[in-house]
Image (spheres, rainbow, N blue to C red):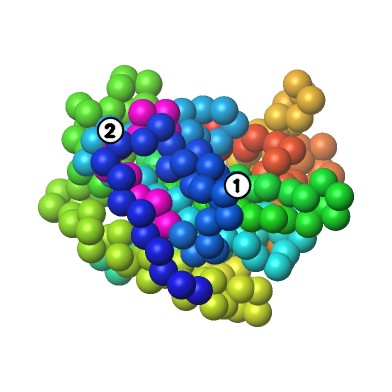
Amino acid sequence: MERNIIYLDTVDSTNSYLKRLAKNGAKEGTIVLAKEQTQGKGRKGRSFQSEQNMGIYMSVLWKPQCELSQLSEVTAWVAVAVARAIEGVTKVSPGIKWVNDLILNHKKVSGILTESSIDCATGKIQYLIIGIGVNVHNKESDFSEEVGKIATSLECVTGKTISKEILQKAMIAELEILYKQWPTGKREYLEGYRKRCITTGKDVIIERNGEKYEGKALEVTEDFRLKIKLKTGEEEIVSSGEVSVRGLNGYLS
Ligand code: BTN
């Protein structure tokens, strides 16, 4: 895949920007990096705090041969790739909160938002925009009160100065490895995911159609879904789109 990196000072959202480029035929592998996002997007319509020079705000355009049902799998692989990059550069090892939040000291340091464009006629994926945000330089006081309860940064956790440029490069290198491994390298990513997953073994609450069900997360399945034993004794396998899982720290994923 050809490397094409676009550096921006400020943008609404690197995902939205790349989506606009993709609609105009941008090449697979195009990467957008911004110093600041004015409307950084999180999952489930939330926003992602993206102040100038605090973090890495990156989106990657990918056109994988995969089924719609594999979308959450792609995102899970990306979580492993980003965790590896962070580990390599900072020497601290983030946990993965199912399905794709990277956690250090019980707080989120990185989130991933994958957006897709589907061809209505064929049902096939036209392209994916994989958006990754990493909090790097933020001090505790840089987060809003609400966000500070659930988010931290690599510098807060390590107490060291972390180079955004070095981490960015490491992330891009890991994404290129991932791209080459898709889909045959699944075993390695699944093992990497299971090893880092902090949700398994925890009490969780599933929220579905306004109802809440309590249970325990048992394992990450072969297709990166979560097997849960409900309090009723029944076992269920859930995927990210249909449920919210609440860990003990109260953070909704
Ligand atoms: C989440 O935690 O819910 C996902 C956060 C994803 C944030 C990244 S930052 C780069 C890209 N552009 C966006 O607007 N969002 C993603």
Q: Nearer the viewer, residue 200 or 187?
A: 187
Q: Is residue 125 magenta?
A: no
Residue type at mark 1? Lys
The quarter of the displayed image where residue 122 is located: bottom right
- Asked if 85 appears above or below 134 in the picture, the reply is below
Q: Are marks 2 and 1 in contact (CB under 8 Å)?
A: no
The quarter of the displayed image where residue 221 is located: bottom right
Give the side of residue 123 with respect to residue 253, left or right: right
Disc 1 element? helix
Q: Which mark is residue 142?
A: none
Location of the C terminus (image quadrant): top right
Disc 2 element? loop
Q: CA separation, marks 2 and 1?
A: 27 Å
Q: Which mark is residue 51?
A: 2
Residue type at mark 2? Glu
Q: Residue at x 42, y 57 (%)?
A: 31
Give the side of residue 1 with respect to residue 34, left or right: right
Q: Position of residue 16 (x, y in %)?
A: 50, 39
Q: Which residues are magenta?
A: 31-40
Q: Position of residue 67 (x, y in %)?
A: 77, 60
* Chief secondary structure of the magenta portion: strand
| Some atom of ligand 1 lies within 8 Å of the CB belonging to the residue at label 1 | no
User: How many numbered marks are there?
Assistant: 2
Name the residue beneath numbered marker 1.
23
Q: Position of residue 169 (x, y in %)?
A: 30, 65
Give the side of residue 131 with respect to residue 185, left or right: left
Q: Is residue 33 magenta?
A: yes
